[in-house]
Each structure stands twice: as structure tokens, then as C-alpha cells.
Amino acid sequence: SQTIHQWPATLVQPVGSPLSLECTVEGTSNPNLYWYRQAAGRGLQLLFYSVGIGQISSEVPQNLSASRPQDRQFILSSKKLLLSDSGFYLCAWSPDRVIGGYTFGSGTRLTVV
Amino acid sequence: RKEVEQDPGPFNVPEGATVAFNCTYSNSASQSFFWYRQDCRKEPKLLMSVYSSGNEDGRFTAQLNRASQYISLLIRDSKLSDSATYLCVVANQAGTALIFGKGTTLSVSS
């Protein structure tokens, strides 16, 4: 069966510090991978999605970037965090198209101080 | 018009009540629809897909009206454990990503 791992669960970072969040999927190949952010009191915002190694689509321009160095690995990064980057970051995967919906990782709660 | 719009609630109902959530979406070309459930400080989890013919899973019934671009979720015989936020979800036109509503909060009390 497929599983998705996301870490760390909680992170407190100072403004201006870098960020790296990692997500890996097991039990499937060539998944579609996604990064979402849920800010306090707001809905899920799609940040990036990837349909293959090295293929990244950015949905919202901001100081975040994503990379997919391996088929089942998706990384979210920032060179310098802003206060507004605080939120609940969720990685998700789906088969080729989203006909069956996504499965989410357990998320990383990021607080920028 | 927002891409996916839901009444945020909260809906406060007693155990055993029937409650209905509604959702509208803006992109008439969307092909896939879902309801997700999100517990406090947890990741969203797929509750059920939504089909034009309507579908039922135990106490939960989902309906889709493509002409009106309207999706609904009916929960019968509410349980305390149904307390959560329910997210209406629509696939984008290309079918490559999901667009989430902000969610409707349900609180079931004894």
C-alpha cells in the first residue's frame, strides 16, 4: 500500500532563516505531488505541484520554491522566511490525475518568529 | 465568484440530527468533486467522491448538480465523532490539482 511521509511535524524558525521541508511517498511510482499551505483561519492554498522529476508548477508567486530531485521525493524550500510564511504545510500525492482525490501527509506546522 | 465557496458555519447540532452542507464552484469544466474531512490540527482526509448520480456511504449522502454548479453533503443521525471541518473540493480544469473550499465547521453535541 502507498504511504506518504512528511517531516518535521512542528517547526519554529526565526524570520530570515532558511527552510527545507521534505515529503516522500512509498509504494507507488511516478505520483503527482503537491504542496499546500493552510494559514490560520484560511483555506488550503495550492503552492506547487509536480507531475514528474524536475517538473514543478508554481501556483502562487512568493519566496518559496519546490524541487523534485527523485520520483517520490518533494522538497519545499525558502532562502529567507517571512512572518507571513507561518502556517500548516501539507504534502499530498495522487495517481496520474486527481480522479480519485489526494492522500495528504500529516503536515508540518511552521511558526516563523 | 470564488472558485469554491462554502458556508463557514459553525453548524451546532445535537446528536441524531440531520445536517446539510452546501457548496458552489465557479469552473463549469471541472470533472471531479470530493468532500474531505479535517479534524482540528490534522491533515484533511477524503470522505467521499461526489458523482452526478448522487452517492451514499452509510450516513453520508453527496449530491452534484452540474447545471447549478452546486455540491451538497447530507449527514444523517449525527454522531459526536462527526464534529470536524468539512471541505468541499473541486478538481481544476486540467484535472491536475484540487481546489479546496475554506470548509464548514460542524459541532455535534450530546
Image (spheres, coloured by chain):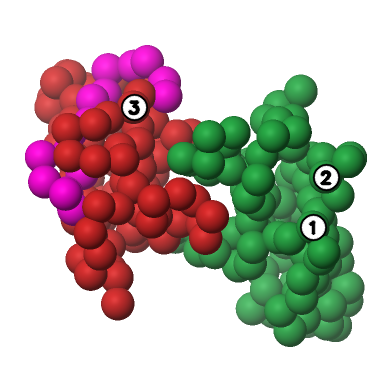
Chain colours: A red, B green
Tell me the residue that label 2 is attached to: B66
Q: Height in image: A87 above or below B80?
A: above
Residue A7, visible in the rendered structure? no
How far apart in space, not on screen, are marks 3 and 2 (Cα)? 28 Å
Q: Height in image: B35 above or below B110?
A: above
Query: For this rendering, which residue is in front, A69 or B39?
Result: A69
Q: Residue at x 22, y 36 (%)?
A: A76
Query: For this rendering, which residue is in front, A17 or B31?
Result: B31
Tell me the residue that label 1 is attached to: B52
Q: Residues within 10 Å of mark 1 (few under 14, many from 20)?
A: few
**Residue A112, percent from left and from top:** 27, 31
1 or 3: mark nearer the eye: 1
How far apart in space, not on screen, are marks 2 and 1 (Cα)? 7 Å
Query: For this rendering, which residue is in front, A83 or A108?
Result: A108
Q: Residue at x 79, y 57 (%)?
A: B52
Q: Pinpoint the chain carrying mark 3.
A: A
